[in-house]
Image (cartoon, coloured by chain):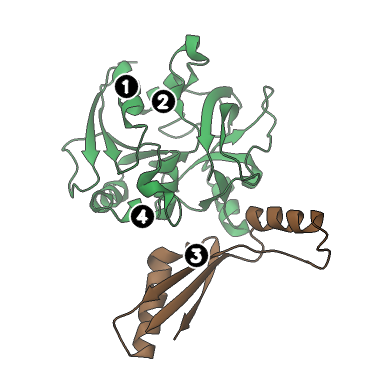
Amino acid sequence: MTAVVNVFLKEGVLDPQGKAAHHALDSLGFASVEDVRIGKQIILKLKTDDKAEAEVEVREMCETLLANTVIEDYTIEIN
Amino acid sequence: MQKRSLKVAVLRFPGTNCEFDTQYAFEKLGHSTELVWHENETLPENIDLIVVPGGFSYGDYLRSGSIARFSPVMKAVVSFANDGGKVLGICNGFQILTEAGLLPGALKRNNNLHFISKHQNLCVINNDNPFLNLCEKGEVLNIPIAHADGNYYIDGAGFKKLEANKQILLRYCDEKGEPVVVNGSVTSIAGICNESKNVFGLMPHPERALEAILGSEDGLRMLQGFEA
């Protein structure tokens, strides 16, 4: 199965890349944009078929390595 | 004061690039140094100081310092630090020490997204620690910076603890010592230490400020602090 991990800077932590992209969208005339956040997506191919087990393990991977929880939040999607 | 000769271990990860400058700096001050490869599980015996030097360990993949902190040698570094041993992280070394949890907070991408490389004034905020004890409080030092991820972040509660416990070591400032925004760091913080004041981290490079003819020798006095 596949786990899709999305890592973003926490709300309230300034995202300079998002801000720069927002500014660029503004200058291109896309006035409808309220905020831009840029994160990263990590796709893991897992050997297990047990969804619950996978979720526990991927959460541990996020807490240990994939995200820095001082500044980042993450979401996990398992398919 | 009798000068004490130190035994300094300088760590080396794939992508480290300031290890020789760091060795040069401590040897210029009369200390002995030894490079320690990241795959080593043990440290040399009887060392007085570990320096985690600057560079781009593991190409800054994922986050700066995030992979290096799991190198075999880091287990030994963490237990050395927990036993009260002195550890200094410079630039990428600072990032590695925050990722390893030896120092609070985290280092984010610079607010202007640029790699900033220049001489920068720093104000000494606290000197009652084994690193900056030869510098005066409020003194302005001129030390080069060279980083893309030097934007120090810590939450409000963490910041209060840093301040109350005098863990803020250095701030980016102008020539008069007034704080300036360089990379977006919380209150312009350039360097901090841990609560027990034996682990130090800073983004500027004291090992690049050793000769007046090359712009500044203020780095000597910083590194000499460890001799006391």
Residue B16 pos. (x, y %): 34, 39
Count of residue discs: 4
Residue found farthest to the top: B213
Q: Quick one: quadrant of the C terminus of chain B? A: top left
Q: Mark 4 is on which residue type?
A: Ile
Give the left or right position of residue B101, taking residue A12 as reference: left
Give the left or right position of residue B104, taking residue B27 as reference: right
Can see residue B112?
yes
Q: Splitting the image into 4 quarters, where does residue A56 fall?
A: bottom left
Q: Image height check: is B225 above or below B88? A: above
Q: Image height check: is A28 above or below B202? A: below
Label 4 to label 2, Cα distance in Å? 24 Å
Q: Which mark is residue B67?
A: 4
Label 2 to label 3, Cα distance in Å? 31 Å
Task: Name the residue rendered at 80%, 63% in the picture.
Answer: A30
Q: Mark 2 is on which residue type?
A: Glu
Q: Mark 1 is on which residue type?
A: Tyr
Circles 2 and 1 on the same subunit: yes
Q: Which mark is residue A69?
A: 3
Q: Quick one: quadrant of the N terminus of chain B? A: top left
Label 1 neighbour load within 10 Å: few <14, some 14-19, many 20+: some
Circles 1 and 3 on the same subunit: no
**Subunit of label 2:** B
As helix, strand or loop, the secondary structure at mark 2 comes to helix
As helix, strand or loop, the secondary structure at mark 1 comes to helix
Which of B117/B145 is in front?
B117
Please report whichever mark, 2 or 1, sits nearer to the chain's N-terminal start.
Answer: 1
Q: Which chain has been coloured green in this picture?
A: B
Whether pointer 4 and pointer 2 mark residues with C-beta atoms closer than 8 Å, the reply is no
Whether pointer 2 and pointer 1 mark residues with C-beta atoms closer than 8 Å, the reply is yes
Label 1 to label 3, Cα distance in Å? 36 Å
